Image (spheres, grey):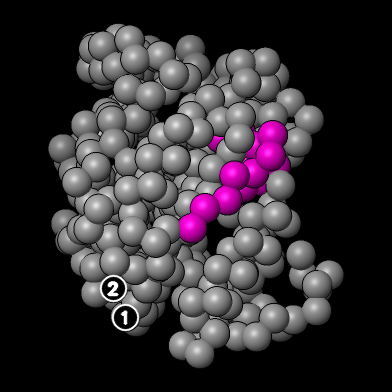
């Protein structure tokens, strides 16, 4: 029986942040993408929870976490403070941080602010700065999307009435596959159904602020200062965070290792989870075997 601990912690402004910890021992803490709950980490949780303490949690206004009282407190910096409150609540002094998509910006910013709390970084399919600038390799989106999001905030209720039924309809999944945002054959349909269904539950004013926070933030100056073990995971065919963006991350961080998942897109972590998890296992074993990471178990158990 695996130890499961879930509950809430209060962040710096009193916002209640939901967390779920599975297993015991060496701590692996995940950070989600924008507008995501923790569903994309399902295979990683299953792989490591029998030997590690795997922590998933929801950003403010996402999933089971509380919407902040002021939308000005939706930012990458606020997410970092939320993460700190989760670590403090679980009495984790130092952890390996994994970030997917916008979660890459969160873990990089967290390292800037609290380097003593980070044992290693594992950025997965996410940029280090100004996410719209490299989205689908179309620089012009950076000029178009922020004004649209700001204009849409005043009409969030109308936008929600139109989009929420669409998000629950099953239509967004094939559109995402046709656009190349996810792999048509490899990305599990149930995970995408949960993802779009989760977006339909969000406050759309908060969602717009979250997207803008991702665009406004940069951690480019952090990359060259990282002095801890880092494994960068990229998707070979990721159009949302193109491969060259991830390549800049691993080339800018001294000593960083990397994995490019063949045919992987922005959801490569669920398209070829075994490859990613085995590579993470190798990385953690090589770096932390004598520092709390447990020896390997026979493959095939709880994958």
- What's the residue at 34%, 54% (across, down)? 253
Q: In the displayed structure, would residue 21 be above or below residue 173?
A: below
The alpha-carbon separation of the residues under discs 2 and 1 comes to 6 Å
Q: In the displayed structure, would residue 59 be above or below residue 129?
A: below
Checking the image for residue 267, the label placed there is none
Residue 256, position as x, y percentages in the image = 42, 58
Report which residue position mark 2 lands on: 117
Q: In the figure, is residue 263 to the left or right of 107?
A: right
Q: Which residues are magenta?
A: 257-271
Q: In the figure, is residue 211 to the left or right of 282?
A: left
Give the mark, 2 or 1, whose residue is nearer the N terminus. 1
Query: Looking at the figure, which quarter contains the C terminus?
Result: bottom right
Query: Looking at the figure, which quarter contains the N terminus?
Result: bottom right
Q: In the displayed structure, would residue 76 be above or below residue 157?
A: below
- What's the residue at 27%, 51% (across, down)? 223
How many dots with numbers?
Answer: 2
Report which residue position mark 1 lands on: 93
Whether 68 is among the magenta residues is no
Q: In the figure, is residue 257 to the left or right of 251?
A: right
Residue 151, position as x, y percentages in the image = 24, 11
Q: Is residue 17 visible?
A: yes
Query: 70 and 151: which one is in front?
Result: 151
Q: Are marks 2 and 1 in contact (CB under 8 Å)?
A: yes
- What's the residue at 69%, 34% (across, down)? 263
Q: Residues within 10 Å of mark 1 (few under 14, many from 20)?
A: few
Q: For numbered disc 2, what is the local secondary structure?
A: helix
Whether 263 is among the magenta residues is yes
Residue 111, position as x, y percentages in the image = 26, 61
Q: Is residue 37 visible?
A: no
């Amino acid at each position: 029986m695996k130890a499961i601990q879930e509950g809430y912690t209060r962040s710096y402004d009193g916002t209640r942040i939901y967390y779920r910890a599975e297993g015991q021992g060496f701590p692996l803490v995940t950070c989600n993408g924008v507008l995501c709950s923790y569903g994309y980490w399902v295979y990683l949780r299953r792989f490591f929870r029998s030997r590690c303490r795997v922590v998933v949690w929801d950003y403010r206004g996402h999933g089971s976490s509380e919407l902040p009282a002021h939308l000005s407190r939706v930012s990458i910096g606020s997410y970092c403070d939320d993460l700190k409150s989760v670590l403090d609540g679980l009495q984790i002094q130092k952890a390996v941080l994994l970030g997917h998509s916008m979660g890459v910006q969160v873990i990089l910013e967290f390292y800037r602010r609290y380097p003593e709390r980070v044992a290693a970084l594992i950025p997965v399919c996410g940029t280090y700065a100004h996410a719209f600038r490299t989205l689908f390799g179309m620089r012009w989106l950076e000029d178009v999307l922020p004004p649209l999001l700001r204009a849409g905030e005043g009409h969030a209720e109308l936008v929600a009435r139109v989009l929420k039924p669409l998000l629950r309809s099953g239509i967004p999944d094939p559109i995402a596959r046709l656009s190349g945002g996810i792999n048509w054959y490899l990305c599990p349909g149930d995970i995408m159904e949960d993802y779009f269904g989760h977006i339909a539950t969000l406050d759309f004013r908060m969602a717009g602020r979250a997207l803008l926070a991702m665009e406004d933030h940069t951690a480019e100056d952090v990359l060259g200062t990282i002095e801890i073990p880092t494994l960068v995971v990229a998707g070979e065919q990721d159009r949302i965070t193109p491969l060259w963006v991830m390549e800049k991350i691993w080339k800018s961080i001294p000593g960083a290792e990397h994995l490019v998942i063949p045919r992987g897109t922005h959801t490569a972590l669920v398209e070829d989870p075994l490859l990613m998890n085995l590579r993470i296992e190798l990385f953690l074993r090589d770096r932390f075997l004598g520092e709390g990471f447990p020896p390997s178990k026979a493959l095939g158990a709880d994958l």
